[in-house]
Amino acid sequence: MSLYREQGVVLRTQKLGEADRIVTLLTAQRGVHRVVAKGVRRTSSRFGARLEPFMVADLQLYEGRSLDTITQASTLGAYGPHISDDYDRFRAANVMVETAERLSDGGPAPEQYRLLIGALRTLAQAKIDPELLRDGYVLRAVAAAGWAPSFASCVSCGADGVHQHFAIPLGGLVCDSCRVPGTPHLDLETIELLRHLLTGNWEAAVESASNARSHAAAMVAGYAQWHLERGLKSLRP
């Protein structure tokens, strides 16, 4: 039996047998990692509450033939209770963990791991609108995966200037000459908000108007769907 330690964020859980769970983690060293937590559904479990969604834990595990098994767990970030007791924060967190799982399932993803922990910590503090945090996280996570949108010069011809057409397939704003029919036209406030979300400028982002937030949310959802090749289930109404 080979023991090892790992730190991870609980993305989701599913029942296994009468008392066990399969826990899907985003880990610091291994990316997405699916493991077994034995007996955690019993009321007498030593660490069941530490392995709920949105919790960050330091874990000891042993290697198994198909799935590794958790033997010890200590809490590093108790974000789950603060998120789950509010419906809007809970919905936003589900979008975050689904995005993280989709972008990190294939190997180590340390930047995605750090981004997710920071987003869940901020979400649990309940100081910023959950939907605003959700959109900022998704945009930055997609950018960290290599698909950073451009809100500066035209992404097609490189022309400088104020461009207001957001071409999702091309990855950013395009000028009037390069736009194709159907390319969304964004107002300047929405473009500024998207810039703030991408850079994590929350002081400026929280000052945005509601219509700019709704337009930005639609662009972020479309951008994520394009690069993930299918929509996020947790974003559906």
Image (spheres, grey):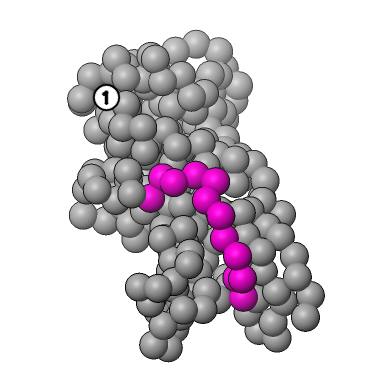
- Compared to residue 152, the image places residue 119 above or below, namely below
- Compared to residue 226, the image places residue 137 above or below, namely above
- Disc 1 marks which residue? 212
What span is in magenta? 69-80
Q: Is residue 176 visible?
A: no
Where's residue 126, x and y in %?
31, 32
Where's residue 231, x and y in %?
38, 57
Q: Is residue 30 left or right of residue 215?
A: right
At horizontal 32% and vertical 45% (from top left) the residue drawn is 83
At horizontal 48% and vertical 64% (from top left) the residue drawn is 47
Residue lying at the far right in this picture: please name it.
2
State the residue in front, 96 or 163. Answer: 96
Residue 229 lies in the magenta-colored region: no
Q: Secondary structure at mark 1?
A: helix
State the residue in front, 159 or 119. Answer: 119
At horizontal 44% and vertical 71% (from top left) the residue drawn is 45
What kind of secondary structure does the magenta stretch mostly adopt? strand
Q: Which quarter of the picture shows residue 27?
A: bottom right
Q: Is residue 39 visible?
A: yes
- Compared to residue 4, the image places residue 116 above or below, namely above
Residue lying at the far bottom in this picture: please name it.
17
